[in-house]
Image: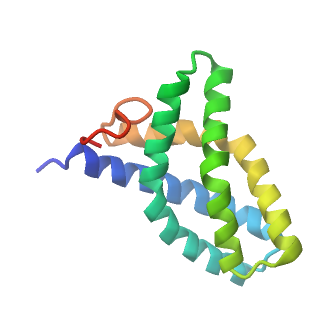
Amino acid sequence: MRLSDGVRAFIADTLALVLFFTLTSGLNERFVAGMTWDEVLVSRSIGAVLMVLTARPYGLWRSWLMAKIDPSTRWGSMLADTAALLIFQVPIYVAIIVAGGAEGQAIVLGTLGFAALMLVLGRPYGLWLDFVRRLFDLEGPGQKPMSLGG
């Protein structure tokens, strides 16, 4: 029995987000924000739950934004992926590290570090997401945004 496109898209988007950002966010929290490994473990545990809840909405958001912008150059794709991550992920990240125990300067440094990561990782994550989606036999940078099929 083959899974529906919608189920495959949910699994692909969730897997891509959890793997990519558990690693990058954990490293940011430990080495940029200065959080302890125990705090990182708490924030990544909270983050994993939130990533499961937000991965597909982010995937739909990114697909919609890419369709609207329709970047035709490498620079355009890089800027679109970066903007998609900054707008969607930074507010969620702030909530995660606050819930994980970050205070004051750690919140500021963690947020700035994560925003800087989004500038650097926007396109690599977009490429990673597209790769994972292809592994699940999903076409291009997502499916038709906001469609009933996925």
The relative height of residue 16 versus residue 30 in the rendered view (above or below) is: above
Residue placed furthest toward the left: 1
Determine the residue positioned at 27% across, 47% down.
6
Q: Quadrant of the C terminus?
A: top left
Q: Specify whether 112 is left or right of 67.
A: right
Determine the residue positioned at 67% across, 47% down.
86
Residue placed furthest toward the top: 72
The relative height of residue 136 versus residue 47 in the rendered view (above or below) is: above
Q: Specify whether 62 is left or right of 99.
A: left
Residue 111 location (% of width, % of height): 77, 61
Determine the residue positioned at 30% across, 38% down.
147
The relative height of residue 1 versus residue 82 in the rendered view (above or below) is: below
Residue 123 location (% of width, % of height): 63, 36
Residue 2 location (% of width, % of height): 15, 47
Residue 32 in view in this figure: no
Residue 9 in view in this figure: yes
